């Protein structure tokens, strides 16, 4: 996988988040995902999928303001600053966040490798 391939995966992830497309998110997130949100709460893949599935979180706007990508063989790290807005548990939110995501090549049973988010963390980005 090269930098452009990771950028394409990031774009697929963005579209899936905006659409709350649980099937696409399921394909992009590792089964043992650990995601630390801006409050310090740790989310699993099931937590994230259920948040989208049941409407707990709705992202209405997600604009990528900057992004760096580094590929290290079978894993890659992205650092992305976004402006986003939506609702969480019915309450509106808006802000600027910085995400760090680790993408890893997961070896499937058939021998092929699939790239998925294995770990992520976000925090508030200063304006």
Image: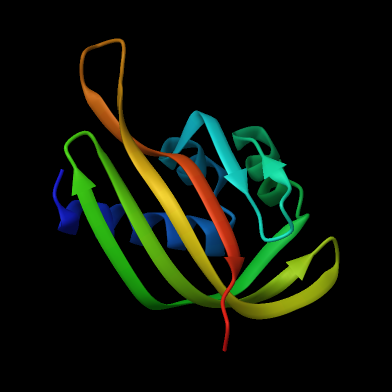
Residue at 69 percent across and 73 percent down: it is 86
Q: Is residue 82 above or below residue 46?
A: below
Q: Which percent across, then down, holds residue 78?
A: 35, 57
In the drawing, does residue 2 fall left or right of residue 21? left
Residue at 29 percent across and 66 percent down: it is 68
User: In front: 24, or 104?
Assistant: 104
Residue at 21 percent across and 21 percent down: it is 112
Q: Which percent across, then down, holds residue 109?
A: 31, 10
Residue 34 figure quarter: top right
Q: Which percent across, then down, holds residue 18?
A: 54, 64
Q: Is residue 26 above or below residue 57?
A: above
Q: Which percent across, then down, holds residue 1?
A: 15, 43
The mark tally for this picture is 0
Q: Is residue 35 above or below residue 83?
A: above
| Residue 111 visible within the image | yes
Point out the residue furthest to the bottom here.
127
Point out the residue furthest to the top here.
109
| Residue 19 visible within the image | no
User: In front: 29, or 74?
Assistant: 74
In the drawing, does residue 27 fall left or right of residue 50? left
Residue at 56 percent across and 72 percent down: it is 97
Q: Is residue 3 above or below residue 34?
A: below
Residue 90 figure quarter: bottom right
């Amino acid at each position: 996988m090269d930098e452009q391939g990771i950028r394409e995966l990031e774009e697929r992830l963005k579209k899936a988040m905006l659409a709350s497309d649980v099937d696409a998110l399921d394909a992009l997130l590792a089964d043992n995902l650990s995601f630390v949100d801006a409050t310090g709460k740790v989310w699993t893949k099931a937590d994230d999928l259920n948040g989208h599935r049941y409407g707990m979180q709705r992202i209405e706007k997600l604009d990528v303001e900057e992004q760096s990508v580094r590929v290290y063989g079978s894993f890659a790290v992205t650092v992305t600053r976004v402006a986003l807005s939506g609702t969480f548990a019915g309450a509106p939110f808006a802000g600027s966040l910085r995400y760090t995501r680790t993408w890893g090549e997961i070896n499937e049973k058939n021998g092929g490798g699939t790239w998925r988010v294995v770990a992520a963390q976000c925090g508030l980005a200063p304006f």
